[in-house]
Structures are given as structure tokens and as C-alpha cells.
Image (cartoon, rainbow, N blue to C red):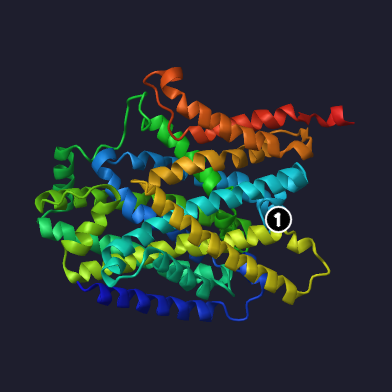
Amino acid sequence: MSATLLFGFVIAYFLVLLGVAKIAGKNSNNMSFFIGNKNSNWMLVAFGMIGTSLSGVTFVSVPGAVTTDAFHYLQITLGYLLGYIAIAYVLLPIYYKLNLTSIYYYLENRLGLGAYKTGASFFILSRTLGATARLYLVVKTLQVFILDNMGVPFWATTLVILIMILLYTYEGGVKTIVWTDTLQTSGMLLGLIICSVYILSSLHFSVSDAFAAMDAKGISNVFDFNVNNKSFFLKQIIGGAFVTLTMTGLDQEMMQKNISVKTLKDAQKNMVTIGFTMLLAISLFLFLGGLLNLYAAQNNVTAVGDSLFPTLALTHMPPYISIIFILALISALFPSADGAITALTSSFCIDILGMQKQADWEEAKRKKIRQRVHLSFAFIFLLLVLVFKWIDNKSIIDLILKIASYTYGPLLGLFAFGILTKRTIKDQWAFLPCFIAPLLCLLLDNLQPILFGNFRIGQELLIINGLFTFIGLWFISSSNSEKK
């Protein structure tokens, strides 16, 4: 199919998105931008957060990884479900009790200003790196299969996409995103289903036939029982639970949408619903990955990994599938990028600049500062996407999980210390254990062959990072009685 025609569909999709954003963001103010005036419908938030959680990485990288990892990713997803339940019944009651705009206010309330600023800073670092890695994968796919043929350079593609995102998030923020994410999640899941049905039809398979063929190729195995492997099922399930607990429950982007829901009970229903829906959605993506492998073998296609799905959809399938793939890919792209830029803007304004504590700032001044910060993060995204292009990691989902192990560990340690103990820390030193813990994990990761032989640390590196942070905080803490 013509690259120009495909690009035309992308523009048409964006215009629809812009129209929805304009209607949803009408009469927005700073509180609309930050937490949607705490008036969001929990069902819309739950459905839209599916798109944010899945992103373009899931749409492309999870099916592509089936070739080498079979269905092992489902082990992590089982852990995700446990993590969502923990968020619903451990973290959300705390956030709602304190009526938080930024979840990192909890750290100030419990541990002090230094812990608060440290936690917010690690969120900004974590979300910036994770979101730009996700954005890079989708931009790369669009570039290789559409924009290169039109002579458009990579940096220009990235810039245009970021401008698109700015156009519909600049005013409305969370109030807008709740609605646009709902539209985009629908597009992504519809694309997943249509592509799966097409391949089943093309191969003349029923669902049971497809599973039998996948099993014959050895790519349908879910559980890994080799304790030495990174994909050992207990490592994956426990690691997945903590990935969700940190990357969702301790993440301002994800919680910003959730605490925009009216009541705690509705927010909890939202979280549990997301957990079960994610399990179903990831199962469908893995099934699609198996189908793609079977289809590639039938058509003698050698593409693997992140290139498998785009190559098949855009060069070996009918034009209407190419259109659906591109629209679904764009639908997967925007929720992970728009929410990230909005949440980073909110966190920087509230947590770093202390906007809500500046009583003498007029609404117009707050809005002007918030918009400048929003533009600044878009520029940072542009630079980092170009850095990821230079690195060009083969599996973005592995890279994102690795980044999370290092950057979310200190957040895990801070919140765990605050919730599980009643000790008081020397607040001016709060940054130190949070800085040292990831360095210790980096050293541990590189020394694995020497220290553990054939045993390999997987997703549990995040837990170890949090534990190092927790221990470090204990060393700079004292009991309340000692303080007295």
C-alpha cells in the first residue's frame, strides 16, 4: 500500500482525536489538567488505562517476543494482577485519605521534604525514560514502513508526533486524556482482534487448530520451571507483581488518572477491573504472536522480534489490514505518550516547583508556568527518542523492564519504609540510599556469573533495589522514642 495513503489515514485519525479532545477539554483549568477536577467516570478511566498500560510496546514487542520466549510473558501478567489488587487495597486508601493531587505528598507527610523531592525526582526520571522508549518503538515502525519512503527524516517524524500530542493535551490534561485514551484503547484492541481473525482465516485454522500448531512449534509454553532462568515462573510472577506495584501504584501518571475518580470504592473497582482486563488482553497479544509466527513460516518471512508484526502487516497482508495495523499502532502510541507528558508536567509543577503551595500565584501565572513545563518535557522527549534511535535496542520491552528495575526501586523502598515502619529518617540524607541502591544493583547485575554461576536474576532485581533502599533508609533513621 502507498506510504502516502497510510500517512493520510494517520492524519485523519489524529483530526478525530483532536475533535474529541476539544469537546472533552472545554472550560478546563489547572485542576482539570492535574486531576480532572476529581470527577472522572471510573469505567472510562479503567478502560483508558488499559491503553496506557499496554502501549505500542505491547502491540509490537510482546507478539514479536513469542518467537524466543514462547508465552512466558503471561507469567509476568499473572503477577500484574496481584499487583493491581495490592494497589487497590493498600495504596489507594492512603491516597484518598490524604486527598492527594500528587501521590508523592505522602512521602512529605510521612518522611519529610527531602524524601518527597527524591521520590518525585525518581518518578520524573523513570517515566521520562520509560515513555520515550515506548515512543521510540512506534516512531521507528512508522519511520521504516511509511516515512522513509516519503523522504521524511526520523527527527521530523518524532517532532510532528510530539506536536500532535501537545495539541490535544496542552489545555485539558487529565480531563481530556480520560476520553482520548478511551477512544485509543478501543482502536488498539479492535486492531488486535481483526488481525488475529484475518490470520486464522488465512491459515484456515480454528482457535484450537492454531494452539495445536503453536504447541507443535514449541511456542505456546507458559510456565518455565528452570529455577536458574530469568523466566522461572516464581521470579516472573513475583517480579510482575512488584513491577505493577511500582510502575502503576507508585507512578504519578497512572495514579493521576485513578485519583481523578470520585470515590475510593470506584477507584478500587477501576484497579481490579484493569488487572483482569490486562490478563485477558496480554493473553490475546501472545496468541496473536503465535499466529504471526505460523503466518511468517507459511510465507517464508524471516523477520523476528519487534520487526515481525510490522513486516507481516504492512508487506504481506491485504491493504485493509495495513490500514488497521497503522491505526491500531497509533492508538497504542498516543496513550503512553500523552499521559506521560501530562503527568510529568503535573509532577514537576506540583512536586518540584511547589505550585500548589504558592498562594500568591494567580491562576494565569500558574497556567503560563504549567504550559512552559509541558513544552519543555516535549522537547526532552524529542531528544531522548533520538538517543534511543542511536542505541537501537532489539527488544524495547526488555529495555523498559530493565530501566524500571533501576529507577523504580528507590520509589519502592521509600514507600515501603513509610508504610511498614514508624521510624523517622534524617530527611536531609534521604537522597543518599536512593542514589546508592541502583548503583549496588548495577554492580550485582554485572557480577552475576561470578556470584551465582548459572543462576540469573530476572525481574526480582527491582525488589532487591527496593530492599537496598529500605536498608539504607533504616541506617539514617531513628525510632520516634529515640527522637524524643
What crowding class fits label 1: few (fewer than 14 Cα within 10 Å), some (14-19), or many (20 or more)?
some
Q: Is residue 260 left or right of residue 52?
A: right
| Residue 473 placement: quadrant | top right
Secondary structure, mark 1, is helix
Q: Is residue 176 left or right of residue 160?
A: right
The reply to whether residue 127 is in sight is yes
Q: Position of residue 19 (x, y in %)?
A: 46, 81
Q: Position of residue 433 (x, y in %)?
A: 67, 33
Residue drawn 54% across the image and 64% down it:
379
* Residue labelled with disc 1: 352
Q: Is residue 276 above or below residue 237?
A: below
Residue drawn 77% across the image and 35% down it:
425
Q: Is residue 79 left or right of residue 421?
A: left
Label total for image: 1
Q: Is residue 166 left or right of residue 452?
A: right
Q: What amino acid type is highlighted by mark number 1?
A: Ile
Residue drawn 36% across the image and 53% down it:
58
The reply to whether residue 464 is in sight is no
| Residue 262 placement: quadrant | bottom right
Residue drawn 49% across the image and 32% down it:
461
Q: Position of residue 445 (x, y in %)?
A: 47, 29
Q: Residue furthest right?
A: 484
Give the position of the N terminus as an image quadrant.
bottom left
Give the position of the C terminus as an image quadrant.
top right
Q: Is residue 269 above or below residue 365?
A: above
Q: Position of residue 324 (x, y in %)?
A: 27, 68
